[in-house]
Image (spheres, rainbow, N blue to C red):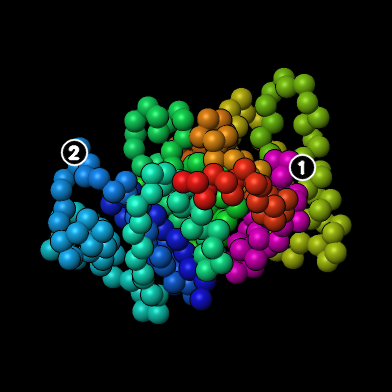
Amino acid sequence: MSRILIPVDFSLACHNAYRFGLHLAEELTLDVVLTHYYSGSIDPRGTLYIGGDGTIHGSHLERLRQFAYATAESPSYPSVEPPCGVEVTYEVEVRMSPAAAIIQRAHQADISMVVMPPRSSDGFLGKWLGSTATTVSEACDRPIYLVPPHCRYRPFRHVVVANNHATADPYPLWQLEGLAEYYASKVHFVHVEVPDRDLPLRFVPWELMHELTEAKPGADYAYEVVSVEDKDISHGLLDYAERIDANLIVIVNQTRSRWQAILRRTLTQDLALRSRFPLLVLHNSTAAQAKSTTQQTETQAS
């Protein structure tokens, strides 16, 4: 059975993403893999936890089990019980780069999507150089759900899609069609026009309209293509999502190498840091079908 990969650093933000992921797993009939990567040494900044068989590896496994089945007696997390029919398994591994490890694990055949919080810390580097989550969403071709803190799962009745040059690609449109049909969603393709910008502003919406209306057999779900004006693209998308009480924001990315994802601030990173809505990151067909030699070398070396 296909599974949802949920990386865990034992934060409350990760536990919220885990609860969101459990709802997705129940809805989509998937299982869950909780994974934790650590450096192999004891972190002097953290609380030392010894459990399981007494080893560092065994302690992390036992902590994952307690994370997955948190009870009211545990003060660390809200109580949670995985739904019947959803199997939760645990994986712990020593890796120097959690982002590279997550990308490598996500590319294995049993993983269909990844669910993570948008960042692991509020520090300067997390905001400006890209968190593990946004790095994964840029460099991994699996669908990535980024779940903000305190965000609760709601069926995806209204979906806002950032209408960019990659959106009209057949592969993400096929994924969106499946999502819309499953949830009976209305899909809002929103293009943010920046005032006084010397670009062919209407190109992207009309290319998308051509794909939706003239492709055979054409789109068979409720949708609309909307243009809004805003000097800040993220603000324009989020403001529209607020107005329609959206349940999900979707953006289609070009897959970048892990180092490009770390160093280059993107719309995806900006949305992930500012949105109160869950963000689904999809990738175009070229990105999804072609894993570059550079990307393979990075994940294997790490």
Tell whether position 282 is magenta: no
Judged left or right of residue 131, residue 293 is: right
Q: SS of the residue at dot 1?
A: helix
Tag 2: amino acid: Pro
Residue 166 lies in quadrant = top right
In percent of width and height, residue 91 lies at 36, 63
In percent of width and height, residue 233 lies at 60, 32
In percent of width and height, residue 8 lies at 34, 54
User: Considering depth in this image, is 190 or 106 the residue closer to the camera?
Assistant: 106
Q: Which mark is residue 219?
A: none
- Number of marks: 2
User: Considering depth in this image, is 270 or 104 the residue closer to the camera?
Assistant: 104
For the question of whether residue 70 can be seen, the reply is no
Residue position marked by numbered label 1 in the rendering: 205
Residue position marked by numbered label 2 in the rendering: 44
Q: Residue furthest bottom?
A: 85
Q: Residue furthest front?
A: 301
Tag 1: amino acid: Pro
In percent of width and height, residue 274 lies at 46, 36
Judged left or right of residue 17, residue 217 is: right
Judged left or right of residue 240, residue 120 is: left
Q: SS of the residue at dot 2?
A: loop
Q: Residues within 10 Å of mark 2 (few under 14, many from 20)?
A: few
First in sequence, mark 1 or 2: give its number.
2
Which span is picked out in magenta?
A: 164-190
For the question of whether residue 61 can be seen, the reply is yes
Q: In the rendered image of this protein, does residue 25 appear above or below residue 104? A: below
Q: How far is mark 1 from mark 2, CA to CA?
A: 52 Å
Q: Residues within 10 Å of mark 1 (few under 14, many from 20)?
A: many
Tell me what residue is drawn at x 78 percent, y 26 percent: 199
